[in-house]
Image: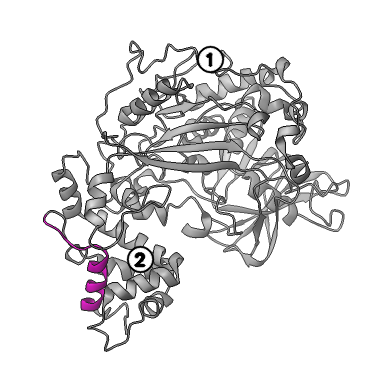
Amino acid sequence: MVSRETGQPRLLARVVDAIIPGDGLFPSASAVGVQGKLLERGFQTVGPAFAESLEHALGLADNAIDMDITTALAAWETRDPASFQDMLTIVYLSYYETLPVKAAIRELGYDYHDTPQPGGYRMTPFDPTSDQENPQHRRGNYLPTGEVKPVHWSALGDLGKRVG
Amino acid sequence: MAIEHASVDVVIVGAGAGGGITAMTLAERGLKVVCLEQGAWVIDADRPHASLDWEWTRQAQWALSPNIRRRQSDYPVETDDSKAFMWNAVGGSTNLYTGTWPRYRPSDFRKGTEHGLAPDWPIAYEDLIPFWHKADADYGISGVAGDPAMPPDQVFQTQPLPRGENGRLGAVALDKLGWHWWPMPTSIVSDTYRGRRPCNNCSACFAGCDIGSIGNTAVTHWPRAIAAGAELRTNARVDRVETDDTGRATGASYIDTQTGQRHLQPASVVVVACNGIGTPRLLLMSSNERFPKGLANSSDQVGRNLMHHTLGFVDMWVDEPTESFMGAIATPIICSEFAETDVSRGFVNGITLHFIRQQGAGFQALGAFSNNRAPWGKDHHSHFRRHFGHGMTILVYGDDLPHPDNRITLSETEVDSSGLPAAKLDYKLS
């Protein structure tokens, strides 16, 4: 039984690693503790029924430690895509918030910060002398108040019937 | 037993954009003003911008929908519609918006003349110009004048925010198409303005702004309103507008949500400024023997014809880096090529295209706004490597049409933390 207290940590670790395995740069989900966040945030958003629904959705039983997790996840995704997506949202957001994963993103060459603040991001300010930023084109128009005229309905299909 | 306060000139229900501006304007002209707000002040340090889990927190405790965040200061909205967005606190929903600030167009006020599927407004664009100028100066708007797609009167307080690679690529593409584009006007200041700090491009605007760069009524108006003598009572949940024997509004009854104590605030004038959902909810909750259908509702129009913006998101990923994780979300550029009605394309009212950014790595892995997420399993990281930092999004932004069945009523099944009926929102895009 998956519970918040016991959480069958090894089983949950296998679940989150089946979702986000590690590779040469990125750690696996369980290596950064996503399994704990999955339970915690599931409780937070769904309530005490989350663990039960997780177990039910995966088709897990107490003795199912050797089951094929990938197959169970794929079956869940097909059977109930909405709840699967909810679970996946927790797993993905929990994974990408961890420091080792953010460090791995920086290894890819991005100036990605651990947190948005303090400091924010350095970007090139608006340059009013650049045509690329301060457009000099004269494209675009608007109808002044006095020039708004009735339009013909023929192209509107049954819109008038549905709304008017 | 309710505590009855001394009568004032005006009691305002709601301390958001409407209530804040009203309180400031009236108090600065010498009226005695009391404002009742069911939420509290938002402490900027409580916002998630400096937390490692900011992406999760902004979708949970800082969610746009009260049905997700479920704070005590909120009331539920019984609905299947996904756009019941609001924030209950001083500053209202300006605590949690992206600061996008495009104006209405002159034709928006003449839809009765144009196609008749909505009425003309009794005022015109030109009537609002002096008020827009004042509001823009108070909120602080960044942008650049001269947009050929808009009337020429708009002035800006600061220059546009950095457009970044996202905006540059969008502008190049629109130039190739020969379509309009312009830097997006926003209420996010790019330079110090009236004591507010300039935006530092942190990217977390969906949780509001923790440094005061976004024009939040709690920052832009309430300090002035209070300095002018307006009294703001927080955690004051109004449950009815009171009326006298003639049917005239005489004040507001409220519950102190911290103590449970009931209060009555008499006033010569009552202003209800609780947004498009909360205002009809309060008027309907204020029904009495004389007004069994709620206040101001002899026409049965209270709560009807609720309108949202229509929002369609188109995510795309390109070979070039887009800096998609930095910069204010909604700022790069706006395309108004299709902003006016064109029945030859089968629709009225037009749309604008807003180039926007895609926030943090978690949100991007989830497929940004379109749920084109990185697959789970062995291909997860290769997908993330190809897509992260290379995405850009176009928000297709329009206005719906009024329909009487799109409406707010009182829920018969859900209540808020004070036991008051929730709002029920029925909405179908028309």
The x, y position of residue A147, in whole percent, is: 71, 16
Would residue B264 be seen by someone viewing this image from the given angle?
yes
The x, y position of residue B397, in whole percent, is: 54, 36
Q: Residues within 10 Å of mark 2 (few under 14, many from 20)?
A: some
Viewport quadrant of the N terminus of chain B? bottom right
> Quadrant location of residue A132?
top left
Vertical order, B105 against B292 (above or below): above
Which residues lie in the magenta part?
A: A9-24
> Quadrant location of residue B350?
top right
Viewport quadrant of the C terminus of chain B? top right
Q: Secondary structure at mark 2?
A: helix
Q: Which residue is mark 2?
A: A41
Total marks shown come to: 2
Residue occupying the point 56% across, 58% down: B257
Q: Secondary structure at mark 1?
A: loop
Q: Which chain does the numbered disc 2 sit on?
A: A
Q: Label 2 amino acid?
A: Arg
Residue occupying the point 74% across, 54% down: B284
Q: Does the magenta run of residues contain B317?
A: no
Q: Residues within 10 Å of mark 1 (few under 14, many from 20)?
A: some
Q: Which residue is mark 1?
A: B148
Q: Label 1 amino acid?
A: Pro
B194 sits left or right of B344 in the view: left
B351 sits left or right of A152 in the view: left
Q: Which chain does the numbered disc 1 sit on?
A: B
Query: Viewer-proximal residue, B36 or A101?
Result: A101
Query: Viewer-proximal residue, B167 or B302?
Result: B167
- Badge nearest the viewer, 2 or 1: 1
Residue occupying the point 25% across, 36% down: A119
